[in-house]
Each structure stands twice: as C-alpha cells, then as structure tokens.
Image (spheres, rainbow, N blue to C red):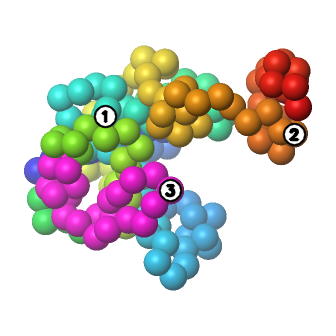
Amino acid sequence: MPVFVHIADARDSAAIRRAGLRISRKRLQWAGEGRPVGIFALPVVADFTVTHQWLRELKRRGHRTAIGIYFRLPDDEPVWAGQYNKAKAPLTAAEAANTLRQSGMLGYEVIIPRAIGPREITAIRALPQTIGWRFFPGSHDRAPCGCDYCQRGEIKARRIRERLGE
C-alpha cells in the first residue's frame, strides 16, 4: 500500500482532520470530457524534494503555511497520473508510485478520483516552506516573459518588465 501526500493550507488542518479530503464543488463543475477530477497527491518516495515538489507553487496561490496530509491507498486503487499540463493516464496507485520512484520527474501529479476519509489519513505534518519549484519545473532555466499579461499581479513585476525592456 503506497503512501501518498496531499499538500494543503495549514488553516484547513482542523477541517481535514475532522472530515477528510473532499473534492471541491468548483472542481466538480470543471469536470468534462477527458479531464480527471479528484484529490491531487503525490506518492511518498525516498527523495523529499520530489515528493513535496508542489509546495512552493501552491504557496504562490495563497497558502501561508503548508502542511502535508499523508494517507495510504490500496495497490489496486485506480488513479490518474502524468506530467503537469499533459494528458493523464489511468493507472493503479502502485503503478503511479513506481513511476515516480523510478523516474523522479518534476511536474508529476496524481489525481485520486474520490474523497479521502478521515480514517484513511495516517498523519498531518508541518512541512518546510521553501521546497520545490515556481511556475513550472525548469522555469529557472529560462528568462521570464516580461509582457504585461504574464506579469500581471506578480511580485516585483515592474522590475522584471524594466529589466527586460518590455
């Protein structure tokens, strides 16, 4: 039974401990043809950075302090897994964990198409707040786009636009 981790806002820890992880109504409305909907998680592997790679990106979206919700899934549990922003393939939980364990790829994500009950949660832990990548895996290997659209609402956007002359 592989262990998975879901990264959440620390302000939601009491509700998660009481009711488990639920699929939001907003996400259910977003569901459509070929778009899997569920709980986003990653298998726990030996490399802490690979396991918690989404932490920094999620903090950009409003999390102040992130926590890890750890839970086990049966080996034959159906999940959707694949690279960020690409089509997801239906796999079992064991296959998804094995894929990440062998490849260690950044940008990997697993979607569990059901809620996780409070009894399935094995631990809720505080996480270091600076793990992972921002924007997308490998984003630090290339210069940012300085246009107004890409920099809207970002921190230090004016400096980036001035530096890039846009």
Q: Is 66 on the left or on the right of 62, as rendered? A: left
Q: Earlier in the sequence, mark 3 or mark 1?
A: 1
Q: Marks 3 and 1: which is nearer the front?
A: 3
| Residue type marked 2 | Asp
Residue placed most toward the observer, 110 or 22: 110
Q: Is 93 on the left or on the right of 41, as rendered? A: left
Residue most extreme to the bottom: 33
Q: Earlier in the sequence, mark 1 or mark 2?
A: 1
Residue range (magenta): 79-99
| Residue type marked 1 | Thr
* Residue 13 image position (x, y, % from top left): 47, 35
> Looking at the image, which residue is at 57% across and 64% down?
27
Q: CA distance from mark 3 to mark 1?
A: 18 Å
Q: Quadrant of residue 113?
A: bottom left
Q: Quadrant of residue 6?
A: top left
| Residue type marked 3 | Asn
Q: CA distance from mark 2 to mark 3?
A: 23 Å
Report which residue position mark 3 lands on.
Answer: 85
Q: Residues within 10 Å of mark 2 (few under 14, many from 20)?
A: few
Q: Quadrant of residue 3?
A: top left
> Looking at the image, which residue is at 48% across and 33% down?
138
Residue placed most toward the observer, 144 or 75: 144
Residue placed most toward the observer, 24 or 15: 24
Asked if 23 appears above or below 148 in the picture, the reply is: below
Report which residue position mark 2 lands on.
Answer: 148
Q: CA distance from mark 1 to mark 2?
A: 33 Å
Report which residue position mark 1 lands on.
Answer: 51
Task: Kindly indicate whether the residue at mark 1 contacts the one at mark 3 (C-beta within 8 angstroms).
Answer: no
Q: Marks 1 and 2: which is nearer the front?
A: 2
